[in-house]
Image (cartoon, rainbow, N blue to C red):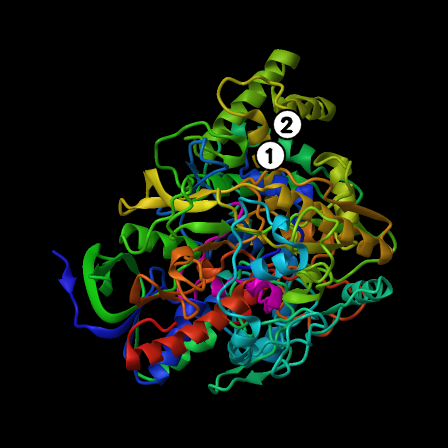
Amino acid sequence: MVGNNGNGLVADKEAEREAQQAEANEGAVLEHAGDDYNNKQINNNSRRKFLVNSGYVIGTLAVGGALSTMFGCTNNNGGNAQEPTATPGGGKETEIPNYNRALMYFTQAQFRIVDSATERIYPEDDNGPGAKKLGVAFFIDHQLAGDWGFNGRDYMSPPFYSGEKVQGYQGRLKRKEIFDIGIQELENYSMTKYSKGFAELEGAQQDEVLKVFENEEANLPTISESFFFRMLRAATLEGVYSDPLYGGNANMEGWRMRSYPGSQMSYLNIIDKEFTKIEPTSLQAHLASH
Amino acid sequence: MAKTLPKTDVVIVGVGWAGGIIAAELTKAGLNVVGLERGKERKTEDYFMVHDELRYSMRYEMMQDLSKETITFRSNDKVRALPMRQYGSFLLGDGLGGSGVHWNGQTYRFLPYDFEIRSKTIERYGKNKIPADMTIQDYGITYDELEPYYDKFEKMAGISGEPNPLGGKRSSEYPTPPMKKTPGMQMFTDAAKKLKLNPYMMPAANLSENYTNPDGVARAACQYCGYCERYGCEYGAKADPVVTVIPVANKTGKFQIRTHSNVRRILHKGGKATGVMYIDVTTGEEIIQPADIVVVTSYVFNNVRLLLTSKLGQPYDPSSGRGVVGKNYAYQVIKGSAVGFFENKEFNTFAGAGSLGVSLDDYNGDNFDHSNVDFIHGGVIAISQTGARPIQNNTVPSGTASWGAEFKKQSLHYANRTLAVGAQGSSMSFKQHFIDLDPTYKDTFGDPLMRITFDFRDQDKNLAKYLAERCNEIVKEMGADKVDYLKELGPYEIMSYQSTHNTGGVIMGAEPGTSAVNNFSQMWDADNVFVVGASSFPQNAGYNPTATVGAFAYRTAEGILKYRQSGGLLV
């Protein structure tokens, strides 16, 4: 019943909501898997050391309860508050790779295309990493493998008729199918125009192709290319800014770039104050605190 | 063959705000009440992982599963209605507490004008001010008569606020002081005062301080975590039925809640209901629950649908204008707003609460002269700081690219540098706007979906433009370097989120020919059936509906107890 979702006017929001999908591609190049961001995350175990030194640890798990009011639940816990890493053999802690970075849905070829396309939508710049480093294509891959990709909670019963624009999506294709087709069409268009696959194009050329799709100028017989593009764009932003638990927003860098503090239990102390920068925490920190 | 259970005094269909309030009041008075809830149980502990924008805002965790049931929509009766296949314009709640769990908590009282809109408009401007096809009507109850019930709702929920200088009379102060004031809210307040407007702190169900209500329910204060709308509250700070009225009903030992129980029919004979038929959705079993009194408190669409599929009351016929069930569907005009970009100032807009804000009613109701404008009514204008979560808040100045290097740079630059002032425009009812049973599309049980026939008319377009201009003036006065605001309202579309304030279909009025229920929410055509909710609004006000729904629920409970004594129509 809520109303006024902030402000109805911002065109950007509408576009985001209207679109709903993401895409991905094949992934050859997993070289950024386990990149700096993950390593940083894994190595950041000072909180655990503190807990160990304080005697508040049983085995590898921090004790919750009252302790949680001291750590993780407040907004001054110094950030990530990463949980302890595994300690195989009970010996010294070792780094564990990010097993989340593998593919549930895309082929490697699809992953590569999505990885490059999302990087054009949200590129690396002076502010920080782009979609590639943030793991956006992995995020999209994982989302397509679940309820969202299958339109599990959408009304997909027939009959299907093409409706008026104001009636919204009326197709029978599921998001994962739209992605399959959209990715293939990006590739086809690139091959026809540049005789190269999308992932192999220069950045400026990739932008050209994406613009053609955005403006519905590819004349696809199958899907609406602008609908696909809007889904891809919306899914890119979701991958950049959702909790890292979903596979994107690596090490919360997406949040950090815009000074978003992630999941905090309380802003009571700053709500009526001037702008305050707060190191982000994620739901993982929250998990330990309950 | 359906299984028939022993009879109960009262059966309630849908346990949200209205159902929860009525259950609490009736069980306290000693009645036996069964509450049937189609969704699952909900509790505060469910929300320890709630700060998850993807799961709750983008994937609609708390909302009705559209694969099982949705609505269909068309702009007018010349077009084929098609299903709302994905969420957009509004969000349908599900589970114990209903939409009362994922609301923002903005708890306004309607203006006295709202209840007597037809009479007062004619009185001031003459008959011709109301277009021939505009079917607005008086509620058959005045603000002053409803005031004690508003008061009751506010005290139960612990509403935080300060008096609205342009609102109706209050019998007492808000039970808790206003929420905190952020720098952005202060800027809005100062600007509004400079423009000679009347700002006041938005009435909030978020709870500004620890509070124990008259039923003895204690709740802790809001932490301004920024996750209210579309989310449940992990503190129980935000008032919702699960942390307020439902435990009170449970404590009596007279309330039996059955979750996963989806009511399909109201059973009736000779103008009286005998009970309801529902499906246990975990087993598929059909069950009959006989009852002396049936209370229908689901969301607007299912309130109407249950009456139509059960053949109770006179269905509305748009060609003749006769009949009442499904009549006067209305919505809200939410896009008339303005957003300001501030180059040299950043704000803690990531923090917030669902009803943390400042409002003004100078352009709401009939608080300004409508002689020279081509619409009636208006809407509340407010700045609200609900928590600018990062997926859904990437506001950039008009003309900025929507992706790529420029978009990234600008959306990061403005991430904490925008303040929006929005209007919640009222929505008048029209002869052509109604809800009925869709002839084609069915829900998971094979029952027809509700079909909405609705569009924005000149009234809405003129109102939106007017309110957007007022918002623009305020944001400018606040010192924004650039302001974007709505220039023209397009047609109503089902894709972009606007408001979950759908209203009408079982409207309230002074007499049976033009309304479905009287001012106790009692059906004219079946005196032991009470239909409660925003479905009873003959048109929609320029505010959030919950306080008014709550007030009507308290009045209904009183009416039911009276009915239990004397029987018959209460009005």
Q: Residue at x 57, y 58 (%)?
A: B118
Q: Position of residue B493 (x, y in %)?
A: 55, 39
Q: Position of residue B297 (x, y in %)?
A: 38, 64
Check contact, mark 2 vs mark 1: CB within 8 A: yes
Front residue of B365 and B220: B365
Tell me the quarter of the picture where residue B81 sits: top left
In the rendered image of this protein, does residue A62 appear above or below residue B447? below
Magenta span includes B449: no
Residue B9 visible to the viewer: yes
In the rendered image of this protein, does residue B345 appear above or below residue B163? above
Magenta segment main secondary structure: loop
Q: Residues within 10 Å of mark 1 (few under 14, many from 20)?
A: many
First in sequence: mark 2 or mark 1? 2
Residue that sits furthest to the left in the current view: B1
Quick check: B296 left or right of A133?
left
Secondary structure at badge 1 equals: helix
Q: Which residue is mark 1?
A: A230
Quick check: B571 left or right of B294?
right
Question: Magenta stretch?
Answer: B88-116
Q: Please give the label number shown on residue A214.
A: 2
In the rendered image of this protein, does residue A194 appear above or below residue A73? above
Magenta span includes B111: yes
Kind of residue sitting beneath label 1: Arg
Q: Position of residue A62 (x, y in %)?
A: 54, 72
Chain identifier of the residue bearing label 2 in the image: A
Kind of residue sitting beneath label 2: Glu
